[in-house]
Amino acid sequence: MKNYINKSIFAHIMKILSNYSSLKEKIREVCERCGRNPDEITIVAVSKTFPFTRIIELNSAGHLDFGENKIREMRDKYYNISFQYNGKINWHMVGHLQSNKVKDIIAFIHLIHSVDTYNLAEVIDNTAKKINKKIDILVQVNTSNEEQKYGVSPDETERLCKQISLLENVNVKGLMTIAKMTEDRDEIRSNFRTLKELHDKIKPEYPDFKYLSMGMTNDFDIAIEEGSNMLRIGSAIFGERINTDQ
């Protein structure tokens, strides 16, 4: 039984590393096609629903950036990993963040991708001040204008960035969007292009404005073609999601 378990774990590790290698090769091919440098693109490995051991396995192979979309899951993984492993991990919050949960991740978060209101930014700022830390954030933009989605409207993005930039303990580092879930690649491209145009318009005002977080497993090629330098990739690395109530 023990040998079977060891073989099963080894197979999981090899599959993840194979997926990761294939993903990087696909990114390289897309970059070559559109004249970009693949080294300028950060992959955030979205490990939601997967056990924390998967993070350790990929991190041990040299990958630094990991994303979660639920606070409790991120917090639990952080503490489980910290207790038994000392590798450097950059934690990204890629899901909706409730104001009353900010305190749970403020001490270890690397980048928050999902700030879409001044009130949330203000809570992050006030919480960060208590531990004398500056927090890097991205402003989430609803480029598809879907009512069920979080994100500030494109028309209000510049104003929100300006408001947040006045906070002492929050650094606005760029923009994030989630394209519409559709098979219409032209519509997806339009969503990404809207964010890139906003990014290019706002960037001259902010010296630290450098991240364009857009593109997931099903649309990262379009995102790269439209200027993304930060991809949020889950199933292309870890495989199909594990059902969980977390």
Image (spheres, rainbow, N blue to C red):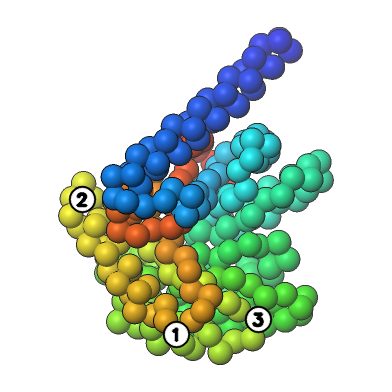
x and y, in percent, of residue 217 in the image: 38, 44
Q: Is residue 150 left or right of residue 83?
A: left
Q: Residue at x 25, y 56 (%)?
A: 188
Asked whether residue 219 appears in the rendered view, the answer is: no
The image quadrant of residue 122 is bottom right
Q: Is residue 131 left or right of residue 195?
A: right
Q: Residue at x 21, y 46 (%)?
A: 183
Q: Which residue is mark 1?
A: 205
Q: Which residue is mark 2?
A: 185
Say above or below: 143 vs 87. below
The 10 Å Cα crowd at callout 3, few under 14, some 14 to 19, many 20 or more, is: many
Q: Is residue 161 left or right of residue 72?
A: left
| Label 2: which secondary element | helix
Q: Residue at x 35, y 83 (%)?
A: 156
> What residue type is disc 2 on?
Arg
The image quadrant of residue 144 is bottom left
| Label 3: which secondary element | loop
**Residue in the foreground of this view, choosing between 226 and 39:** 39
- Mark 2 touching mark 1, by CB under 8 A? no
Q: Which residue is mark 3?
A: 169
Q: Residue at x 69, y 17 (%)?
A: 6
Separation (CA) of disc 2 from disc 1: 31 Å
Separation (CA) of disc 2 from disc 3: 38 Å
First-in-chain label (1 vs 3): 3
Q: Is residue 81 left or right of residue 36?
A: right
